[in-house]
């Protein structure tokens, strides 16, 4: 096992600093809405990548961001997907908070021997846990990018 950890560290240490710098620049450019900069930085990262796997990954990123830059419909779909995932993640956090709120209600109902209060706590926690599970599944399903092949090229 220690040998596997050493090999993993060796692989990461072989990544050129240029690839890491380009990737951090990509994140900043993407936040500013400069997709052309992101494409350029990924092309540079692919050019300086030491390993074939990093090169393939950066080339796939170039293809993806180029498609986003050139196809308005695909861009709208991806932005909508990302916004939906963000809203679902916020709802999942709310469901987790509701679950946490339900537990003191359950305990309070049991301590005070108020069955109705305890049942309300169970209902709140139960619905929240089920909602959290469903939202987690939806987030996992929607987290992957929309395949380019599913979107017909615009006219």
Image (tube, rainbow, N blue to C red):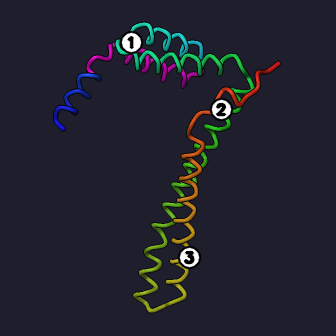
Magenta segment, principal secondary structure? helix
**Range of residues picked out in magenta:** 13-34
Q: Are marks 1 and 3 in contact (CB under 8 Å)?
A: no
Taking the spot 43% from the left edge, 87% from the top edge, the residue there is 110
Taking the spot 48% from the left edge, 23% from the top edge, the residue there is 27
Residue 98 spot, x, y in % from top left = 52, 65
* Label drawn at residue 78: 2
The CA span between labels 1 and 2 is: 27 Å
Q: Is residue 7 left or right of residue 130?
A: left
Which residue matches tag 3? 123
Secondary structure beneath disc 1?
loop
* For residue 116, above or below residue 149: below
How many C-alpha atoms fall within 10 Å of the one at disc 2: few (<14), some, or many (≥20)? Answer: some
* For residue 34, above or below residue 140: above
- Does the magenta-highlighted stretch encompass residue 31? yes
Which residue matches tag 1? 49
Taking the spot 55% from the left edge, 80% from the top edge, the residue there is 120
How many C-alpha atoms fall within 10 Å of the one at disc 1: few (<14), some, or many (≥20)? Answer: many
């Amino acid at each position: 096992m220690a040998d596997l950890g050493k090999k993993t560290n060796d692989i990461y240490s072989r990544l050129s600093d240029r690839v890491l710098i380009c990737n951090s620049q990509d994140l900043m450019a993407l936040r500013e809405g400069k997709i052309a900069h992101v494409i350029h930085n990924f092309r540079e990262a692919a050019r300086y990548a030491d390993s074939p796997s990093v090169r393939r990954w950066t080339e796939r990123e170039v293809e993806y961001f180029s498609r986003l830059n050139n196809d308005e419909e695909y861009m709208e779909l991806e932005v909508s997907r990302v916004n939906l995932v963000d809203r679902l993640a916020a709802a999942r956090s709310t469901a987790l908070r509701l679950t946490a709120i339900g537990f003191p209600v359950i305990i309070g109902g049991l301590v005070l021997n108020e069955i109705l209060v305890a049942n309300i706590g169970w209902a709140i926690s139960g619905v929240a846990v089920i909602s959290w599970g469903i939202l987690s599944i939806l987030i996992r399903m929607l987290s992957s990018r929309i395949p380019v092949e599913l979107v017909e090229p615009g006219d």
